[in-house]
Amino acid sequence: MLIKKRFNLNLASNPLRNRRLFFFLLSFMGILLIVLSFLAINLFLKYSRKAKQVKASISNVEKKIRIATRKEEEFTTNIKEATKIYKDRVDFINGIILRKSFSWVNFLGNLERALPDSSYIISLAPKLLSDSRMEVKFKAVSRNLDNLLKLINNLKALKFKNIRVESEKEDERGMLVSEISLSYERNI
């Protein structure tokens, strides 16, 4: 018995296909997808761990910032309280230092140079305004009005400022007693 095999010659309607290439490409793409998925998952896990570490360090830094801010506020309030408590003492000590640092020798030397030979000072009331500036009231005794004018001109020449004669009177010996106020500023 002969088996008849049907032989189809119509190759255009039912062509033979080489499926091996497609299976190879499909399996290669599947393996590549699996490898890329594995790498992506690995990267995701690695960077998610790093992100957790960064978040933990950020929260730690924020906690330290809050602590530092609290300490700064405490120090600020302590400084304000200490300023209130010790202000008078500090001002007193600064006043002592100011009086010590002021050059009285220069001031009194300039005042003595301004006095005419026949005039002299009987009282002196200085008032320090800053470490280089002072207001002074003093009483000067002069023989006559010419000596008083010479004193005032000499004071102006020595750079004393705001010179004012506040009062004048004659004493029992016939001398002119004048109360004078002025400002003195030393050169720093």
Image: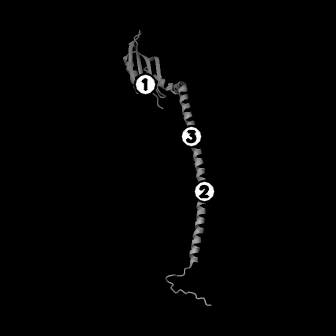
Choose between 174 and 139: the one closer to the eye.
139
Q: Position of residue 83 (x, y in %)?
A: 53, 28
| Residue 85 in the figure: left or right of residue 165 | right
Residue that numbered label 2 is attached to: 45
Give the secondary structure at mark 3.
helix
Q: Are marks 3 and 1 in contact (CB under 8 Å)?
A: no
On screen, residue 25 above or below 2 = above
| Residue 77 in the figure: left or right of residue 144 | right
> Which three-letter amino acid code belongs to the residue tagged 1?
Ser
Q: Nearer the viewer, mark 2 or mark 3?
A: 2
Residue projecting furthest to the right: 1
Residue that numbered label 1 is attached to: 183
Q: Measuring 57% from the left and 69% from the top, which residue is drawn there?
A: 29
Q: Badge 2, how many Cα within 10 Å: few under 14, some, many 20+?
A: few
Distance CA(mark 2)–CA(mark 3): 31 Å
Pointer 1 or 2: first along the chain: 2
Q: How many marks?
A: 3
Q: Quadrant of residue 164?
A: top left
Distance CA(mark 1)–CA(mark 2): 81 Å
* The N terminus - image quarter: bottom right
> Which three-letter amino acid code belongs to the residue tagged 3?
Arg
Choose between 94 and 1: the one closer to the eye.
1
> Which three-letter amino acid code belongs to the residue tagged 2?
Leu
Residue projecting furthest to the front: 1
Pointer 3 or 1: first along the chain: 3
Q: Position of residue 120 (x, y in %)?
A: 45, 17
Q: Which mark is residue 66?
A: 3
Q: Are marks 2 and 3 in contact (CB under 8 Å)?
A: no
Distance CA(mark 3)–CA(mark 1): 53 Å
Q: Position of residue 151 (x, y in %)?
A: 40, 21
Q: Nearer the viewer, mark 1 or mark 2?
A: 2
